[in-house]
């Protein structure tokens, strides 16, 4: 059965009129539970010490006490800190461990994490770009803690996951592969950013031009690493690359998305695969995109 995570209280991360709103995960939850047989996993509150694994303690502590100290945003108004934000963001990041535990215990091999706030822009020392803590990075580190030594992260959000890259830049045990629009926030992720020290060669950026189509997009995935044999595959699933999304100029169709997911899943068929929600802001497009994703994940285990 498809493993699934959702936090019914994530509205407590209250972003007001921002693009990244709770209706995103609630809309996904409605269609996911109506159409698919899911095994819902238990949320974990986690602790700030767990977040220290990927973030500088001073940043985590600052977020923890931020709201009561009058902080209302992280870096800019793009990343809102409401009264409940710390609790919800901590719970999102730490709950990713429930999926790894379920994989480890043989409860399933495919998962969708319908969580917010997203995480891939959150760097070691700061959140930004709608992201407070880096969910997929904590998931990757925990996967390693329980024995999945080599982790492949594939990030197809239209924006470069600068945070995930930052956390694993000097690491050769986590391979970070990102496809993203070159001329879009956060303007990082050029092809020559490939890692550093022992991590050199373990970051692969595939920036693309504005207006990319399905064919051009699919070709980027030919560059997935042949010489890195992962034990688990974690996907930063950002749906802001779809043609109806106003936040980018990419023109990816639902057919293109389905084909990309099929290629990834068939390539790593034998491994646990988890999709972690990142971007995607047009609600109709987002719901259909996640539907396509849940279909792709489900059919690979049926
Ligand atoms: Zn994005």
Image (tube, rainbow, N blue to C red):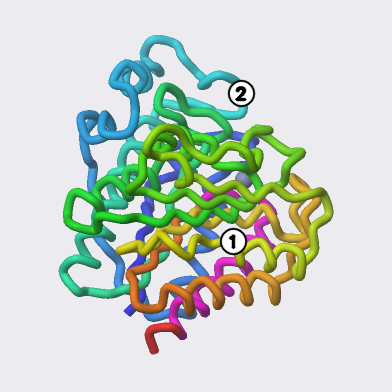
Residue at x-position 36% and y-position 30% = 86
Q: Specify the quadrant that holds the N terminus.
A: bottom left
Q: Is residue 153 above or below residue 68?
A: below
Q: Residue furthest top?
A: 69
Q: Is residue 72 above or below residue 23?
A: above
Q: Secondary structure at mark 2?
A: strand
Residue 135 in which image quadrant:
top left
Q: Is residue 74 above or below residue 214?
A: above
Q: Specify the quadrant that holds the C terminus.
A: bottom left
Residue 113 visible within the image: no
Residue at x-position 55% and y-position 19% = 75
Residue 131 relative to residue 101: left or right:
right
Of tags 1 and 2, which is closer to the observer?
Answer: 1
Type of secondary structure dominating the magenta stretch: helix
Q: Which residue is mark 2?
A: 77
Say which of 273 and 128 sits in front.
Answer: 273
Is residue 297 found inside the magenta-colored segment of the image? yes
Say which of 91 and 269 sits in front.
Answer: 269
Q: Is there a contact, CB below 8 Å, between mark 1 and mark 2?
A: no
The picture places residue 47, in percent across and down from the top left corner, at 21, 34
Q: Secondary structure at mark 1?
A: helix
Q: Residues within 10 Å of mark 2 (few under 14, many from 20)?
A: some
Which image quarter has ligand 1?
top right
The picture places residue 88, in percent across and down from the top left corner, at 36, 39
Alpha carbon separation for disc pair 1 and 2: 36 Å
Q: Residue furthest bottom?
A: 302
Residue 39 relative to residue 83: left or right:
left
The picture places residue 14, in percent across and down from the top left corner, at 50, 35
Q: Residue furthest right?
A: 211
Residues drawn in magenta: 278-299
Residue 101 in which image quadrant:
bottom left
Q: Which residue is mark 1?
A: 223
């Amino acid at each position: 059965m498809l493993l699934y995570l959702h936090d019914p209280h994530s509205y407590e991360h209250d972003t007001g009129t921002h693009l990244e709103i709770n209706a995103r995960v609630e809309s996904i939850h409605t269609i996911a539970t109506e159409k698919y047989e899911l095994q819902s996993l238990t949320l974990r509150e986690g602790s700030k010490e767990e977040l220290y694994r990927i973030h500088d303690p001073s940043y985590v502590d600052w977020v923890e006490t931020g709201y009561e100290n009058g902080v209302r945003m992280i870096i800019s108004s793009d990343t809102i800190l409401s009264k409940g934000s710390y609790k919800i963001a901590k719970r999102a990041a730490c709950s990713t461990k429930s999926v790894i535990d379920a994989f480890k215990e043989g409860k399933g091999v495919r998962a969708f994490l319908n969580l917010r706030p997203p995480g891939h822009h959150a760097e070691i020392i700061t959140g930004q770009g709608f992201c407070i803590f880096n969910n997929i990075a904590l998931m990757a580190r925990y996967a390693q803690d329980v024995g999945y030594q080599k982790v492949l992260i594939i990030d197809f959000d239209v924006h470069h996951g600068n945070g995930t890259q930052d956390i694993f830049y000097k690491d050769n045990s986590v391979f970070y592969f990102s496809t993203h629009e070159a001329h879009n926030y956060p303007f990082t992720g050029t092809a020559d950013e490939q890692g550093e020290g022992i991590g050199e060669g373990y970051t692969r950026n595939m920036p693309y031009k504005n207006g990319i189509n399905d064919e051009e997009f699919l070709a980027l995935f030919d560059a997935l690493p042949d010489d890195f044999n992962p034990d688990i595959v974690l996907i930063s699933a950002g749906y802001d690359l779809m043609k109806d999304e106003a936040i980018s100029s990419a023109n990816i169709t639902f057919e293109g998305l389905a084909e990309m997911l099929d290629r990834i899943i068939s390539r790593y068929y034998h491994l646990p695969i988890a999709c972690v929600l990142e971007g995607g802001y047009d609600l109709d497009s987002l719901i259909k995109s996640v539907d396509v994703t849940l279909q792709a994940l489900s059919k690979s285990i049926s």
